[in-house]
Amino acid sequence: MMQWRIVPTAAGIGYLLMLLILMLVAVNYSNNLIFTLCFLMTATMLLSVWLSIRNLWGFRATHVRVRPVHAGQDLAFEIALNEHSGQHHLYLTLSSQDKQRSKTTLQPFYHLRSGQPFEWVYQQPTQQRGLHNPQRLNVDTVWPLGLFKLSRPLIELPETLVYPQAKSAQSIPETTCGQAAHAHTEAEELAGLRAYQPGDNPRRINWRSLSKGQNLQVKEFDGAAGDPAIWLRWQDLHAIGYEARIRTLCHHILECQKRGQEFGLLLPGIELPPKRGGQHISTCLKQLALLPGER
Amino acid sequence: MTSLALHTSSHNSLHSLNVRPELAPVFDQLNQLILGKELQIKLSLSCLLAGGHLLLEDLPGMGKTVLSHSLAAVLGLDYNRVQFTNDLLPADLLGASIYQADQQNFRFMPGPVFTQLLLADEINRATPKTQSALLEAMEEKQVSLEGETRKLPDPFFVIATQNPAEQIGTSPLPESQLDRFLIRIEMGYPVKDAELAILSGVSRRQLLQQTQHSIRPDDLITYQHSVADVECSAMALEYLYELLQFSRHSSLFVNGLSTRAGLGLLNAAKAWAWLDGSDHLLPAHIQAVFPFVAGHRLQHTEGNHSPLRNGELILEQVQVPR
Amino acid sequence: MRQYFGDRSQRLCLGLWFLALLPAIHQLAWVHLLLCLVPIALYHTMRQRPFVRWAMMGTVLFIAIGWIVLNGQPWLSAQTIISVLALVLLLKWAESRTARELRLSAMASLVLATLSSLYLYGLLALAYLVSCGILMLLCLLAINDSEHQLSYRQLLKTTLNLSVLALPVTVLLFVTVPRIQGPLWDIGLAIGLPIELAIDQDARDIGLKATLKAGQVSRLKRSDAPVLVAEFSGAVPYKSRLYWRGPVFSDYDGISWTLPDNWNNRGRLLRHSLRGPDAVLNVLTSKRDRVHYEARVSPHSGRWLYSLDLPSGQTPEAFISGDFQLLGIRKISREFKYDVDAWLEYSGGIPLSAEQRSAYLQYPANSNPKLRAFGQQLAQSSPDPQDILHQWRKTLVTGGYQLTEITDIDSARDNLDTFFFERKTGGIEHLASSTALVLRAAGIPTRLISGYRGGSLIALTNFVVVKQEHAHVWVEIWTDEQGWQRVDAKDFVAPPEPEQRLAQSAAAVKAKPQEEAQTPNSSAASSASQSNPNAKKPADSQTTKDRSSDKGWLSRLNLGFETWMLNYNPDRQIELMKKGGLRHVDWKNLAALAVLGLILLALIYGLLLQIGQQKQDPVRRSFEQLNKQMRKRQLACHAQECPSQWLQRIATSQPPFYPALEQIVGQYMTLRYTTSTELLPKRIQQFQRDVKRLIAML
């Protein structure tokens, strides 16, 4: 579990080269002062390893949390840290064994300055929908002299769900597809009372307030004209490719969420009846994300 | 790992359900009224002692009403019961000013909320508007109507009952409002002996009518002060903090526990400790109340987890600071 | 204005560069100094416009190199190397944008600083080098601190901390890392590089010749061109006992010693040679200390193989001549390899013919009359050659003679008289020639041997490199009883003064970057020693001060510094190690010692690191100890468990443990979960004691 790794950086190799040159100059002139300098530099190099170790030591990640994202977005792992050594930890970088991560991206530095809990965000780009495999997150440092890169495991990143990308040129089908989704409950919701006006439906008169000696009032209801629930169906999208269908359905789901519309999802072998709310949407997105790849 | 599983499964049975002598009569009386529900009773008492409000959640007919009624009866509190329906208006709950023709002025008619113990039955049947009116009163312990602020009596407890969210025709309390309830408990089916006793014995309602209160509301207020005096060491606070932190950082949950939840947890745990006869807070006390305080405030990312399980998941993972 | 030269790491690098150049700045030509101002002046323009950058860099380098070519400055001279390196580094600094480039620039600046430090001496040089090193570390740190997390002061503090912590390691490395004596060429020679490579084309023709004039040997001593490389089987004898035999002279005309005209005639040489495996041994009357070695001789114009005195044994393509020289059958026009035995102490030879005897007694007419008179006087006092020799040595010891290494000595007819009776200082040739003449005047047959004495031992190996600088001349005398025996007057007179050595070393420092010293055109070397009087003077005044007041702490510090730092060499290292109890000192042992020491220090540092971290709570430590014991019985308190629950668990599952545990866990819970601070230390102690007692009982 605790695997520390130490690799000389390019600067470290340059430094070794410099030491070699100093050594050669010292030998050539049999100059003890240059020997001294050479050994002093060697000693600082060795000591910088200890300082690096101390820089990586004394804190641990306690938790990591991550929210699902859509493919193409960055996964943001929020890592909670607990510093217990009372040291400052400067210039730490995070890395994971993800081959997709391009090397050119400039890695941010993290600093840990006190004995307080701390939170870091580690971002990782995603490209494919589905389960993002768990990986180990390493914390690295080249501090103080930049001659060696030390790394140690910080925490295991959890398996994460990546939703499909939401992309579509098509608008949501406005059909209820013959199957009636059940009506909005909102139609029954009481919004308030207002003064009676001639012509109001007598069934909506609030007799109770009249009995308390108040004026004639009528009940008002909200959402009487709620949209009917719709079905998002896999087979409706036969004209486009496999992954494109997934992206389209994902787009439609998000669109429904934006409009606050109730919807159901019909996928091959899976039927999710119409509902609303965050839980429903995440279930639908999860089903889409986990659809097997095209054969 | 096996021992850990053993530890969690025996979680409830390991807590002693004895109470300190001052409250023993109350506890005994309640246990006679509600059979086989010692844990629920102790939790409800803790909730009242901590000054919080209680959410009872279960299917109809599981003794929710009996529990609240018994509490009121045994503790000698004024008791009002409001059956929440979808046409219940805020004014029906809080009260309204009525024009008195003879005196040519408006008089405020207090609603049922002006009582010491309010049973809000089937709160999820009411419209969100009414719900939030009640929740506001719970939080502020006062009612603002027509520009006038009226204090609610002290002590003031709300026991709300709720049918499980799956039931048709309900508006489940939104997460933000669940936070107002300190403790949420489920009644659950009684064990066999208890159920047989209920079936064969006298009606609970009759028993209730015969019940004499064993303490007075003033005593309750004194006890509440004693609860606040329970010692809480830095280590105990640290553990409590770790629990909160875990809920915030774990990806098991959509949202972490709020600071209000933390405060509630501390108060509830103190009340439990006090009930247990301890003058200082132990991690065990926090653990005892934690699933009931935290469960309903957490939403598992996978969904479909019982609130109680949410709390236990955290307890299983957070280490007690040594 | 503060931000003029980029950010602070850029500025620090410029500072380092300037410091690195500072001691050598007077060596730089004014053109180069002016050129250095260009990148500094044009810093901003060149960073903004790539065209300006390239144009400027090209122009600066072109002018700098052009100037060197026009002035005929030697390419490998220290001056050229330093000025070009400094200019290139400055240009690199000015155009560097990334951290990597800056790091490179900082590290290369340190190399420049070491070269510059050769112009300084003693403590000053040490202080200079150390401050350069620290500044370089500061640069690296500042470059790494790209987000300015540390202020200048914190940076400096970190660097100084690092340096101070590094001191023990530095001392360890200084003492134990196997020392190799330079120059690098010697090491190459030991490894087996051809000797020719180490010799300049111009220097090829120097070396001992068929004639020997005053000043010739001293001039040879200016050169470090290798003559031969010998690998001894077994330990290397003391260097002073190594006499490498070259031309043997008997004819002296008052100015120069010459070989007979037909000296190079192979037929004649072979006729007189000592052939056969025991030919040499048969003519020796005494012999001691046999060594065996293998030698490679650099090519030269003669036949001499410069074998170690006295050669015996046989080796292909070579023979031993009548006067004990190992000669090549052919001229040594390419590197020659041989292995023979040698007797370090010897006497003997083929009995002299009358003709030979008169040749070895020949005294040049009309020259050096005083010496002749002196010799005759010696002969009158005692007829015994050993007595005469003894008298002669006494004269040398008491006469206050002083060897010098001055090359330009007039070669007048009576110059040996002048040397011996008036000046009393002169080269080794004067001394040896005077000895020969005095002894001849005293009636002892004498010959002059030219060759080399000593050599540089390559540390921790059995290799000895003999160079022109080891050139030497000594005398052999003939007695009828013992035959030839060696008389070296050098051991009885004072060696060259330290000041001279200093001057010489300062000159050598300057000559060495030129890779090969140009001895024939010694004008370069002498001009260098003239141009650098200020490097020598402060050191001189320091040494004289040392002698005048031995008590001041500064002088004592200086003395310690000189003996333990400046003059710490392979010999001293071996001596120290032997004192420290290391029986056998070779590079493997030393390296092992260094590694062991490093590991030890690393452990110490690691421990310090740990101690700095772990100030664990005593209550917690005791609790964990208890828990460890309970874990062995499968009764541990789980990490997620409250101690009270643990107690309950034990009460139900293992009742015998309960009473003891209840008391201790109760104490623990009181300590942990109540807020009372009354008698807290006492309670903690009590708890620790009880835990210990319980563990003992378990």
Image (cartoon, coloured by chain):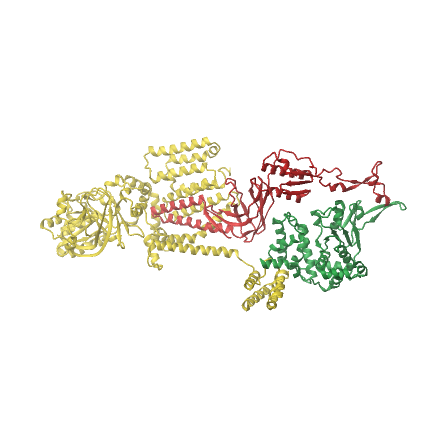
Chain colours: A red, B green, C yellow
Give the number of callouts.
0
Taking C183 as reference, is B272 above or below it? below
Question: Of residues A53 and A253, which is closer to you in this image?
Answer: A253
Tell me if I can see residue C349 in this picture.
Answer: yes
Residue C110 horizontal/vertical position (percent): 41, 44
The C terminus of chain B - image quarter: bottom right
The N terminus of chain B - image quarter: bottom right
Tell me if I can see residue C677 in this picture.
Answer: no
Residue B59 horizontal/vertical position (percent): 73, 52
Q: Quadrant of residue B75?
A: bottom right
Residue C285 horizontal/vertical position (percent): 15, 56
Left or right, residue B227 beside residue C400: right
Taking C263 as reference, is B52 above or below it? below
Left or right, residue A42 beside residue B202: left
Residue farthest left in this picture: C354
Question: Of residues B101 and B185, which is closer to you in this image?
Answer: B185
Q: Quadrant of residue A291?
A: top right
Left or right, residue C443 beside residue A262: left
Residue C208 horizontal/vertical position (percent): 21, 44
Question: Of residues C112 and A246, which is closer to you in this image?
Answer: A246
Residue farthest right in this picture: B102
The residue that appears at 23% across and 40% down in the rendered structure is C205
Taking C471 as reference, is C585 above or below it? below
